[in-house]
Amino acid sequence: MIPDAASADTNPSDTAPSLAAPKKKPHAPLKSMTFFQHLEELRTTLVRMIVVAGVASIAGWFVSEHMLALLIPPELGQVHYFGPTEGFMIRFKVSLVVGILVAMPLLLLQIWSFVAPGLFQHEKRLLLPILLSSTLLFYLGLGFSYVLVVPRMVDFFLSFSAATVRPIINVTQYFSFVAKFCLAFGLVFQIPVVIVLLAWFGLVTPRQLWAQWRYGVVAIFVLAAWLTPPDAVSQLMMAGPMILLYLAAIGIAFLVGRRRARS
């Protein structure tokens, strides 16, 4: 039997499956969501965050008394409260702050799970390191303020007491004082993150930041003088880390700019 002309012209390698270059499966289309579905997803994320923060704050209640003892230095002696509910409220505030600080990585994970599906791959590569580094720098700022700055500031203000003028420290006011300065340092330590983001989006360049470093140092000292007591030691304790963070951020921005140019 003479084979058919069409079958004779057919190359056997065309009909056999190719092992060298298998066909890729097409990517599944992204799941589209309506506006109300986005709202529902946001509501679910917020509920999870509230539950996580609430559970951590309840656990923080059991260590709130110990945390208060750690916050109050020995030179203060006893601190006082002046209302029947103030003792309960200060422990509630301490437990809430402790719970949020402990649960912050989980809270950020919930935020990441909400925004990540809507990001491109290059945006994910940028946002995830930003979240991690921002959290780490915030904790470093809190620790630096609590260990080094706050005790120095307490000593400075207590130095104005005399034999006829003795301080009576209110526990709520003292906790607010410590919390504000720790929060200020936590935010100040975000300088590298802010500079890297500005450089990534092209709003500033590392060369501009380096050329204007003198103005940056002056601005840092002005901010440190505004946030700290009027003594040189406290100002240097805040301005020194800020200057180092500023210079480190310029170096990181150089690296980010090179990587972005290659991509």
Image (cartoon, grey):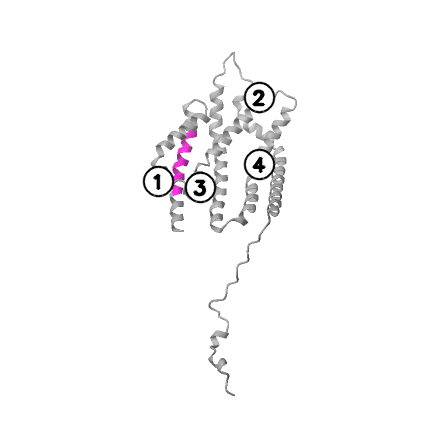
Of pointers 1 and 2, the one earlier in the residue sequence: 2
Q: Judging from the image, what secondary structure is the residue with disc 2 in?
A: loop
Q: Judging from the image, what secondary structure is the residue with disc 3 in?
A: helix
Q: What residue type is labelled 3?
A: Leu
Query: Label 2 belongs to which residue?
Result: 170
Which residue lies most toward the left here?
211
What is the CA distance from the residue labelled 2 to the residue labelled 3?
41 Å
Label of residue 207 in the image? 1
Which residue lies most toward the top here?
164
What is the CA distance from the residue labelled 2 to the residue labelled 4?
24 Å
What is the CA distance from the residue labelled 1 to the residue labelled 2?
49 Å
Query: Label 3 belongs to which residue?
Result: 197
What is the CA distance from the residue labelled 3 to the residue labelled 4?
25 Å
Q: Give the range drawn in magenta.
A: 237-253
Of pointers 2 and 4, the one earlier in the residue sequence: 4
Query: Whole-percent x and y of residue 42?
Result: 60, 44
Q: Which of marks 1 and 2 is in front?
A: 1
Q: What residue type is labelled 1?
A: Arg
Of pointers 2 and 3, the one earlier in the residue sequence: 2
